[in-house]
Every structure is written in structure tokens, then in C-alpha cells.
Amino acid sequence: MVKIGVTSQVARGEAVQATLQSYIDCVRAAGGEPVLLEWEPQHAVELVASVDGVLMIGGADVDPAYYGIHPPHPSVVCAPARRDGFEVELARLALESGVPMLGICRGLQVMNIALGGTLVQDIAAVLPTAGEHQQQYPQSGRAARPRGERTHTVEIEPASLLAQALGTRERLLQVNSMHHQAVGRVSSELAVVARAVERDPRVEIVEGLEARQGRHPFYLAVQWHPEELANPAVGGDAAAEDARGLFAALVAAAQWRGALHS
């Protein structure tokens, strides 16, 4: 069974919370063995070498100092510095070493920052005509929606690795949305493969990124939360093929890489 390193939100010995459990369950259901990775920047090289693939999960905001902004916007709630340092280094190492990586929400943002991209610190402040992207903490005055509920539409590039992983030929996909930040400048190493369908055509919210063709066999990230779309406990559907497909594709890429190096 291939080992999938999961960038844990908990320190060693602490209880696994429900949000982290959703990621773990999806990796296991796809046939991978989840391995929680501690936030140890000094050991990033050894940790990435110890697994067959990496799942970069969601969480608090990345310190804007990583993309050249100081001080941060008042809405920014930074993750621990140790986490930022570890995950940024992990994202760089995965690209350079060819280790398969799937990023989710914050994970997408980390991967873009690690490769020279930037973020919009607060969508509502910078892009006030953008649609609602925080279904649990809506700014529109609406009631909170369950984490697993599909609340907005994204457009997928049909020839992308993302479309292949999702197992769909449809350009439009309904997803959930729980982020107040978005990709600003896209890293030159990455290609945009999904965008939110916005009412204002002047607004672009990146929803999917992947390594440019030939750069890496599986370096993929989405802004939504597929682990919750597949979790009935939070309003998702255990049979959600598109959500399950992303984790299955990560495990398959890890197996393929393992076979090449065996």
C-alpha cells in the first residue's frame, strides 16, 4: 500500500479532529495509507522522501510575508509559522523531486506561493463584486450552509489533468466553497485549469492549478474541499465520484511512481 503524507493540522499526540479525519478517510478509501506529517521544516527533505505522495490540506491563512506583503490585511488569520515554513518547503520539494502532490484549499494557495505566486488577501475587500466563497461564514447575510453542500459552479479545462482526475467530460462542476482568499498572480510553473463562474465577468477566482505540461506528472490543486463533498456527516455524498476521483488519482500517481522506482 502506498504511503500518502498528509500535512496534519495537529501536533504529535493531539486528537485528530473531524475535518482532518475527512481527509484521512478519503485517502484510505482510495487505497492509500495516510501518514500524518509533522510541521518540521528542518526535516522536510527526509519526510518527502519517506512517502509516495503528499496531500496538502486546508487550514488557516499563509503569512503574507511569504509573497511580499506586510502588514497583513485585518481579516488574515495566520497559521503557525512552523506550518507555513514546512509546507512551503514541502511544495517546492515535491515539484523538484517528482513526488505526486494534491493540494486542497490552503494547499492550493501554498503550492502557488511556494513557486513564486501571490494571493488576494481578502476576496470581499479586493474583489467586492465576486460571488460568495465562504458558505460557512457568508458575508452576504445568508445562513451558513453545510461544509459538504455544493454551493457554486466552477469551469474545468477539459484537456487538463484535473478533468481526468475528476472523471468528467463536463466543463461545469458544482462544488463547495470555504475560503476568503484567492490566487493573485499565478506562478509561472503552474497552469490555471479551473475558474469560478462569476456573475461579474471582470472577476477571476482561480479554482484549480496544476503543473505545466511536462513539468511534473501529478502536481494538482483545487480551491474547494472534495473531502467534505464525500462526507455525509457534513452534508456531502459518500458516492461523490468527482470528489473520490481526486484522491484515487493521487494514490494511482503514487503507485505509478513507486513502480518506476522499485
Image (spheres, grey):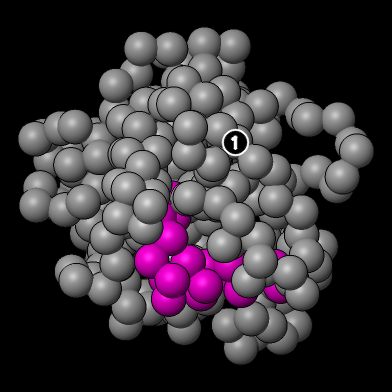
- Residue 146 painted magenta: no
| Image: 47 above or below 235 | below
Q: Badge 1 is on which residue? A: 34
Residue 70, image x, y percentages: 71, 86
Give, as a three-letter code, the residue at label 1: Pro
Report the span colored magenta: 84-102
Residue 194, image x, y percentages: 26, 52
Relative depth, front residue between 16 and 188 = 16
Residue 197 shows up from this direction: no
Residue 154, image x, y percentages: 27, 43
Which residue is found at the position 58% from the left and 67% from the top? Answer: 90
| Image: 165 above or below 211 | above
Residue 78, image x, y percentages: 76, 63
Residue at the extreme front of the image, as rendered: 262
- Residue 93 painted magenta: yes
Left or right for 170, reference 96: left
Q: Quadrant of residue 49?
A: bottom right
Q: Residues within 10 Å of mark 1 (few under 14, many from 20)?
A: many
Left or right for 83, reference 185: right
Which residue is found at the position 35% from the left and 32% from the top? Answer: 248
Which residue is found at the position 59% from the left and 11% from the top? Answer: 233
Which residue is found at the position 76% from the left and 54% from the top? Answer: 38
Left or right for 54, reference 60: left
